[in-house]
Image (cartoon, helix red, strand yellow):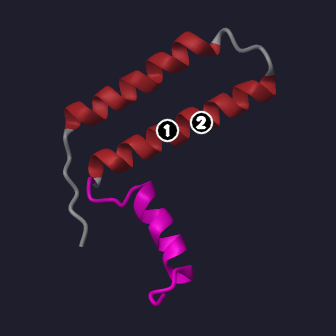
Amino acid sequence: MTYIDVDLGELLAITLTIAAVWLLEWRGIKDGKTRAVFAFLLITLWVLGMLISLIPDLPGPPQLIKAMIEPFMRTEI
């Protein structure tokens, strides 16, 4: 069972940081494709920040790599 720890200050800080980056950089991006990629990246970062903040017990990249490689490792030498 996962534990959801809600800290509104942390969630607000993540949201305000992403919003500030969006506001400061959006006008400088003229190309529509670049804007789409930029928006996708910012939304992805916001979602990841929320997940990490709300569920601190989520496994990180080392656990993912270990889970992917573990079936191919031999236990006997």
Q: Quadrant of residue 11?
A: top left
| Secondary structure of the residue carrying numbered label 2 | helix
The stretch in magenta equals 56-77
The residue at 26%/53% (across/down) is: 56
Q: Residue 58 bears which disc, if any?
A: none
Q: Is residue 72 magenta?
A: yes
Name, please, the residue furthest toward the bottom.
76
- Relative height, residue 4 to residue 29 (above, below): below
Characterize the local packing of mark 2: few (<14), some (14-19) or many (20 or more) Cα atoms within 10 angstroms.
few
Q: Are marks 2 and 1 in contact (CB under 8 Å)?
A: yes
Q: Which residue is located at x 59 percent, y 36 percent?
A: 41
**Residue highlighted by disc 1:** 45
Q: Residue under circle 2?
A: 41
Picture residue at 37% right of the left edge, 23% below the top? 16
Amino acid at the residue labelled 2: Leu
Q: Is residue 68 left or right of residue 18?
A: right
Q: With respect to residue 55, does 37 lie above or below?
A: above
Instruction: Determine the residue positioned at 67% across, 9% down.
Output: 28
59 or 55, which is in the foreground?
59
- Residue furthest front in the image: 77
